[in-house]
Image: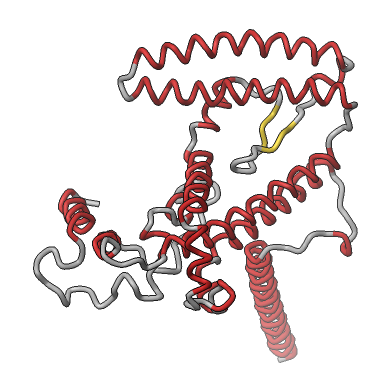
Amino acid sequence: MTAHDQMRAMLDQLMGTARNGESNRYSTKFYDNKVCKSFLLGCCPHEILASTRMDLGECPKVHDLALRADYENAAKSKDYYYDVDAMEHLQAFIADCDRRTEAAKKRLAETQEELTAEVAAKANAVHELAEEIGKKLAKAEALGEAGQVEESMKLMSEIDELRARKAKAEQEYRSAIPASSYQQQKLRVCEVCSAYLGIHDNDVRLADHFGGKLHLGFLAIREKLIELEKTAGPRQKELRRNGRREGGSFDDDRARSRFVGSRELDRRSRALVRDKDRDRRDNRGERKPSSERPERTDRSERRRSKSRERRTRSRDRHSRDRDRDRRDRDRDRDRDRRRRTRSRERSRR
């Protein structure tokens, strides 16, 4: 985006669609159904998670900073209940994320070596201290970049104390299990973004996770949902009493278009898990029976289709080459036969 485009976007965000006195400049209004109401309140997951591992792609609804400015100006004199719309959107999105987190925990329980209650408690203690260190380290780095050196140094002193506690907890965990089992990576699922965290992850890796765009994006979404549930939750009941919405829900078309992001995230997560499981089996040289293999994704199906087409074209090309070689051999044989025939006739004369 050029500097000129950035200035235009800033003016649109501040003054709305009619900043130049052009009331008919935009055919779309902020209250149209095709405008993303979550974006108007600054909490659309498509925008927050853009350019992350869980990028949902472009939102199916309209995002425009000028329309957001129009809504903010209009909301001063009238209640449009768009915060209720955004709350229901985020509730559906977070519900899918939480289901994915529980599924990841279940997979870990099935695949990881089962620990006794005492050892599991010690492992969880190491995980909790490591996560606290990662969060504080990410915050200290952010404060340092913002120029708040004293606050950053104060956090670093707290991190040193946590590291000492973590070293002690690791020693207790190490002494509670066999030496051969200690090197095995014990994983834990992040409650915010569903990522896997290992018990042997170092502080830098944890700081990168807790300070990364994906984790912070999910954290912002969850915090916005808590805020909306406090402010918009009571007004949702008021909206139902007024009869503006039957049963407090949208019609099917609006619900499908608004909640597509959460379902897409869930679908992509399942596809990633299937790909990882398939790669792990391939590396071990194991193949499940066809009846037990997971359903293949559309992308892999397209790749196989293209591969089959290439093989078909290759076979056709080789077949044409063989036919051409056969014709050439037949032609040469006929030519030699005619030459020998003419030679015999000349010899008789």
Is residue 7 found left or right of 238 in the rendered image?
A: left
Q: Residue at x 69, y 38 (%)?
A: 189
Say if 88 sits above or below 32 in the image: above
Spot occupied by residue 19 in the image (x, y as percentages of width and height): 13, 63
The residue lying toward the viewer, choosing from 279 and 97, is: 97
Spot occupied by residue 220 in the image (x, y as percentages of width and height): 47, 44
Is residue 112 found left or right of 221 in the rendered image?
A: right
| Quadrant in the rendering for residue 331 | bottom right
Q: Residue at x 69, y 55 (%)?
A: 270
Q: Residue at x 59, y 57 (%)?
A: 265
The residue lying toward the viewer, choosing from 49 and 159, is: 159
Spot occupied by residue 281 in the image (x, y as percentages of width and height): 81, 46
Is residue 90 found left or right of 104 in the rendered image?
A: left
| Quadrant in the rendering for residue 336 | bottom right
Say if 174 sits above or below 109 in the image: above
Judging from the image, the colouring scheme is secondary structure
Residue ranking furthest to the left: 21
- The count of marks equals 0
Q: Residue at x 58, y 60 (%)?
A: 262
Q: Where, quadrant-wise, is the C terminus in this rendering?
A: bottom right
Spot occupied by residue 141 in the image (x, y as percentages of width and height): 42, 22
The residue lying toward the viewer, choosing from 175 and 111, is: 175
Is residue 255 found left or right of 307 in the rendered image?
A: left
